[in-house]
Amino acid sequence: MTEAAVDLLLLADTHVPRRARDLPPVVWDAVDAADVVLHAGDWVDVALLDALEARARRVVGCWGNNDGADLRARLPEVARAELGGVRFAVVHETGQAAGREARCAAAYPDADVLVFGHSHIPWDTVAPGGLRLLNPGSPTDRRRQPAGTYLTARASGGALHDVVLHPVPPRA
């Protein structure tokens, strides 16, 4: 039996309300379009988690290093979900870029895709053995990137398809 297709929105490092008052409108539109929102930590305030849970069909998220006790009480350090036949792990921190693929493949042998954050730098690689590592960047705190970013993808039939990095347009 084939797994149903699941449209995904991948976020990390939103830092609301420290870096932005709210998510950009284009991101809220992506929330509305997604079946599942995966968030790799650094929410900063529980109000964003509440807002996403109220608006999204489903949220799978973890806490990050900037998240306090209120978020850590509601979110795991590592979130896991099987979506469209694809096994996801969602974590905030994976350490330095050098050696990341091998380190994460050893740490997450039961995952097909690892969604992570922390650096605010988009990342899309595949580790030896097939683990795909995805970092959506940050939609609100671009740091050294030309624009804020987020990812969309589709999981179906046990595979990840249509992974697209989206730049966040500058606010008018």
Image: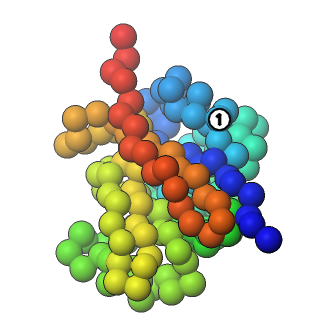
Q: Is residue 98 rendered to the left or right of residue 37?
A: left
Q: Is residue 42 rendered to the left or right of residue 127?
A: right
| View extreme (front): residue | 1
Q: Residue at x 67, y 53 (%)?
A: 6
Residue 46 position (above or below residue 27) = below
Near-viewer residue (136 or 96): 136
Q: Position of residue 150 (x, y in %)?
A: 43, 42
Q: Which residue is drawn at 49% across and 50% down?
A: 162
Count every numbered label the image shows and give the total: 1
Q: Dot 1 lies on which element?
A: helix
| View extreme (right): residue | 1
| View extreme (top): residue | 172
Colour scheme? rainbow
Near-viewer residue (58 or 33): 33
Which of the image's four quarters has the N terminus? bottom right
Q: Position of residue 134 (x, y in %)?
A: 41, 60
Q: Which quadrant holds residue 128?
A: bottom left
Residue 41 position (above or below residue 142) = below
Amino acid identity at mark 1: Ala
Q: Which residue is drawn at 65% across and 35% down?
A: 33
Near-viewer residue (63 or 156): 156
Residue underneath mark 1: 33
Residue 141 position (above or below residue 101) = above
Q: Where is residue 165 in the image (x, y as percent from the top left)?
A: 39, 44
Q: Which quadrant holds residue 126?
A: bottom left
Mark 1 surroundings within 10 Å by alpha-carbon count, few (fewer than 14), some (14 through 19), many (20 or more): some
